[in-house]
């Protein structure tokens, strides 16, 4: 998909990968509507963008609020014209605890942001996208969406739901002008723990030393945009995601136990 002169909606545009995707699209000549819950985060994105006036708009919105999301297509079209692409990058993690210790309120929040937020934006923008000459939907899942991570079970469940929803949407969009892509990041050096309101427990230094090198948000953003341009079916970000994708399909039990052993020190 050509990026220049197209209009894109990016969720999570106020930090991390969403910010980098926003900046990257602008650098390639696109117009962007950046969505985020954080007004301060969006303001920082604007400061970093240096985009010509009018090519970037920011929208403080909670994607879990369906009524608020449903107002966005008209609002964004008024500022930019019809939307050509939707990139769902926003997401949060859960506290590093086992399911038995996870509160219902936390589980509902994670599912509402990570899954229902994606559903809300897709339902809101899909009619417009189907009417465009060429359009795209890109949803960010996670390596945790195909590989279970103890202490992040509900986060993984929400991202697995995004994976299956996106893959089903890909199938449903065959014969239309809408390209659909699912992204599986591995470890990316973002502030997702802080932005999720999660405190990291004491990390085992030995485990930290053995941990795979994380991908930078800028590199992850670049790979997401490249996947969008190519109309890729799947994008795996990081050597950890690529390796565990193969390993989990070849030996799912062994892959699960490998991650379980790595997470022991976090869960006690």
Image: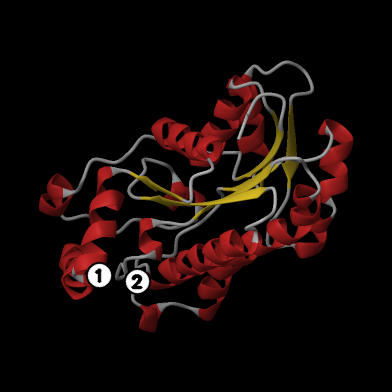
| Residue 266 visible | no
Image-quadrant location for residue 173: bottom right
The first of marks 2 and 1 along the sequence is 2
Neighbourhood count class around disc 2 (C-alpha, 10 Å): few under 14, some 14–19, many 20 upward: some
Horizontal side, residue 130 vs residue 119: left or right: right
At which x and y percent is residue 90? 56, 50
Q: Which residue is mark 1?
A: 267
Q: How many marks?
A: 2
**Residue at 33% in and 76% down:** 98
Any mark on residue 97, and which?
2
Mark 1 residue element: helix
Q: Quadrant of the C terminus?
A: bottom left
Any mark on residue 186, and which?
none
At which x and y percent is residue 152? 37, 67
User: Quick check: 80 above or below 65?
Assistant: above
Horizontal side, residue 56 vs residue 47: left or right: right
At which x and y percent is residue 170? 57, 59
User: How far, Cα to Cα, is label 2 from label 1?
Assistant: 6 Å
Q: Quadrant of the N terminus?
A: top right
**Residue at 52% in and 63% down:** 167
**Residue at 10% in and 51% down:** 206
Neighbourhood count class around disc 1 (C-alpha, 10 Å): few under 14, some 14–19, many 20 upward: few
227 or 268: nearer the viewer: 227
User: Quick check: 239 above or below 55?
Assistant: below
**Residue at 66% in and 31% down:** 43
146 or 102: nearer the viewer: 146
């Amino acid at each position: 998909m050509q990026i220049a002169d197209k209009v894109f909606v990016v969720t999570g545009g106020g930090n991390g990968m969403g910010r980098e995707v926003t900046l990257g699209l602008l650098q390639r000549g696109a117009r962007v509507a950046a969505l985020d819950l954080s007004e301060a985060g969006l303001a920082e994105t604007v400061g970093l963008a240096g985009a010509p006036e009018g090519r970037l708009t920011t929208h403080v919105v909670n994607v879990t609020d369906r009524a608020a999301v449903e107002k966005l297509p008209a609002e964004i079209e008024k500022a930019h014209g019809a939307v050509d692409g939707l990139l769902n990058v926003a997401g949060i993690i859960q506290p590093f605890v086992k399911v038995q210790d996870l509160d219902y309120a936390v589980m509902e929040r994670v599912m509402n942001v990570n899954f229902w937020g994606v559903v809300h934006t897709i339902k809101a923008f899909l009619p417009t996208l189907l009417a465009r000459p060429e359009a795209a939907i890109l949803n960010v899942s996670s390596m945790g969406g195909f590989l279970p991570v103890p202490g992040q079970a509900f986060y993984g469940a929400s991202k697995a739901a995004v994976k299956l929803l996106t893959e089903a949407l890909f199938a449903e969009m065959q014969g239309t002008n809408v390209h659909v892509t699912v992204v599986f990041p591995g470890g990316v050096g973002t502030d997702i723990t802080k932005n999720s309101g999660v405190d990291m427990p004491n990390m085992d230094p030995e485990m930290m030393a053995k941990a795979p090198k994380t991908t930078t948000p800028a590199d992850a953003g670049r790979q997401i945009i490249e996947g969008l341009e190519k109309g890729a079916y799947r994008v795996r970000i990081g050597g950890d995601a690529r390796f565990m994708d193969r390993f989990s399909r070849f030996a799912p039990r062994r892959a699960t136990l490998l991650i379980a052993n790595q997470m022991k020190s976090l869960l006690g």
